[in-house]
Image (cartoon, grey):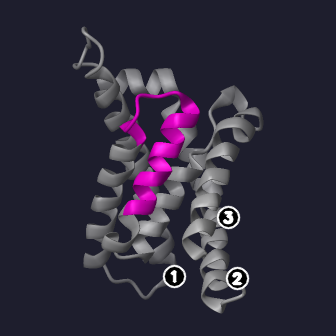
Amino acid sequence: MRKILIAILIFLAAIIQVSFLPNLFPGHVAPDIMLVGAIIWSVWKNLKRAWLWIILAGLVLDVLTFDYLGVNAISFFIISLGVSSLSKRVTADNKILIVLLYAGFIIVGTIANFLIGDILNGLNRSAVDWSGLLAETVNRNGLIRKIFFNLIVSPFIYWLIVKMKTFLRSGEII
């Protein structure tokens, strides 16, 4: 039952990200709540336990955005692999340092998601200008605004994941 509930929550989050959030944020540059959730989940969980959910989140997002199948799944998995690896090597007791660590993961993860997505989508095109990939990504897709919005929604996503984890542990599910 818990696995079904998590799958439903992933699907609902993807629907909210694709259909609802672009209408709330200027320029239709909405926060990537699926990516932020994958990053937070990667810090908390062992990647061996979380990789299936992260790939599922990416695949659901690919289907709902009509992107090439697997682009977000591969991107989320690579980012989660890096975040999980780095978070296990860093220990922090100071709350400010922990917040800065999460913010750094979200900033780097957002940039990596754009670059990996552009590279994987570029592999499907015949002519790609690889030299200006980062500059084009920043200018065309509103990367700076995406990072800003991801940082703004990250405390809310963190809170939701904490509540979901508490709810799933409490055994209140029939």
The range drawn in magenta is 52-72
Instruction: Kindly identify the residue that appears in the image at 67 percent across and 82 percent down.
Output: 167
Considering only vertical position in the picture, is 122 above or below 108? above
Which callout, 3 or 2, points at the residue further toward the start of the chain? 3
The numbered disc on residue 156 is: 3
Which callout, 1 or 3, points at the residue further toward the start of the chain? 1
Residue 122, image x, y percentages: 30, 21
How dense is the environment of label 1, judged by Cα within 10 Å: few (below 14), some, or many (20 and up)?
few
Task: Using the rendered view, name the quadrant where residue 75 is placed.
Answer: top left
- Taking depth in this image into account, of 154 and 12 the one nearest to the observer is 12
Residue 7, image x, y percentages: 57, 60
Instruction: Kindly identify the residue that appears in the image at 25 percent across and 9 percent down.
Output: 126
Image quarter of the N terminus: bottom right
The numbered disc on residue 8 is: none
Q: Is residue 104 visible?
A: no
Residue 104, image x, y percentages: 41, 59
Q: Amino acid at mark 1?
A: Lys
Q: Secondary structure at mark 3?
A: helix
Distance between the alpha carbons at the discs numbered 1 and 3? 17 Å
The numbered disc on residue 173 is: 2
